[in-house]
Amino acid sequence: MPTTLADFEARVGTEIGVSDWLLIDQKRIALFADATNDHQWIHLDEERAKRELPTGKTIAHGYLTLSLIPCLTRGMLKIDGATRVINYGLNKVRFMAMVPVGSRVRARQRLLSVREKAGAIQTTSEITIEIEGAERPACVAETIGLFFIGTGEGG
């Protein structure tokens, strides 16, 4: 596992890690619906989903799937001396497949680039959220993180 800038540079273009599987249950979906005020029936109405969705089940919000990236990738990228890590944003996100309730998902992280920026180390990664047993991933996102080294203001 890379821990220094030089280690990271050597790993550009490679897979950094794969997370454990995480269950997407109806409680998690309902809590996300409440947190975001997105109560569309496809996420919450189990009876209607049985009749009208191809999966026959409610499905997770795309943004719920996306929001799991920090949880699923925690600890995959580490830099010695980093005092904090900041989510700097996303370059691209695509939702490729529905995540039916009861599915398990995991993240696969590939390091795309690394560079120094404003007293930090900036990483860009491709995160693929896989659904157990499915051919297509649920989501593919290009994420940007900033690792600040040292202590005190600005670092």
Image (cartoon, rainbow, N blue to C red):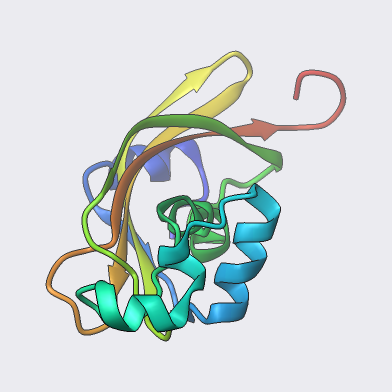
Residue positioned 27% across, 41% down in the render: 12
Residue 104 horizontal side relative to residue 116, left or right = left
Question: In the image, residue 7 lies at what x, y percent?
Answer: 40, 45
Label total for image: 0
Question: In the image, residue 51 lies at what x, y percent?
Answer: 28, 80
Residue reaching furthest to the top: 118
Q: Quadrant of residue 97?
A: bottom left
Relative to 85, does residue 19 appear above or below in the rendering? below
Question: In the image, residue 131 lies at what x, y percent?
Answer: 29, 74
Q: Quadrant of residue 55?
A: bottom left
Residue positioned 61% across, 69% down in the render: 30
* Viewer-side residue, 91 vs 110: 91
Quarter containing the N terminus = bottom left
Question: In the image, residue 146 lies at what x, y percent?
Answer: 57, 31
* Viewer-side residue, 25 vs 88: 25
Residue positioned 15% across, 66% down in the render: 136
* Viewer-side residue, 43 vs 127: 43
Relative to 82, does residue 137 appear above or below in the rendering? below
Residue positioned 57% across, 62% down in the render: 71
Residue 58 horizontal side relative to residue 80, left or right = left
Residue reaching furthest to the right: 152
